[in-house]
Image (tube, helix red, strand yellow):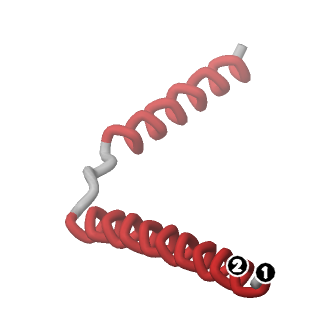
Amino acid sequence: MIKLGKSVMAALIMSALIAGLFCCQKKEGPAERAGKQIDKAVEKAGQQIEKAGEKIQDAAKDTNKK
């Protein structure tokens, strides 16, 4: 009976700690928002570079066919 009580108490304490962690999370700050914007900008730039590389490859193929 004592082991069951300790197990239940341990489970309740763990549940309270986990709930506390989730409740105390702060919203993202200005640095995190800026980081996300930078990530998006870098991703868009990478896509544009990839498109430019494809165009260069296509132009090179057209030149070789002539």
* Of residues 51 and 34, the one drawn nearer to the viewer in this rendering: 51
Looking at the picture, which amino acid does disc 1 mark?
A: Lys
Q: Residue at x 61, y 21 (%)?
A: 8
Residue where numbered disc 2 is placed? 62
Q: Position of residue 10 (x, y in %)?
A: 59, 31
Spatial separation of the CA atoms under disc 2 and disc 1: 5 Å
Left/right placement of residue 48 relative to residue 34 reads right
Disc 2 marks a residue whose amino acid type is Asp
Tag shown at residue 65 = 1
Quarter of the view holding residue 29: bottom left
**Direction from residue 4 to residue 9 in the image, left or right:** left
Q: Position of residue 18 (x, y in %)?
A: 48, 38
Q: Are marks 2 and 1 in contact (CB under 8 Å)?
A: yes
Nearest the viewer among 47 and 35 is: 47
Q: Residue at x 75, y 84 (%)?
A: 66
Q: Is residue 23 above or below residue 31?
A: above
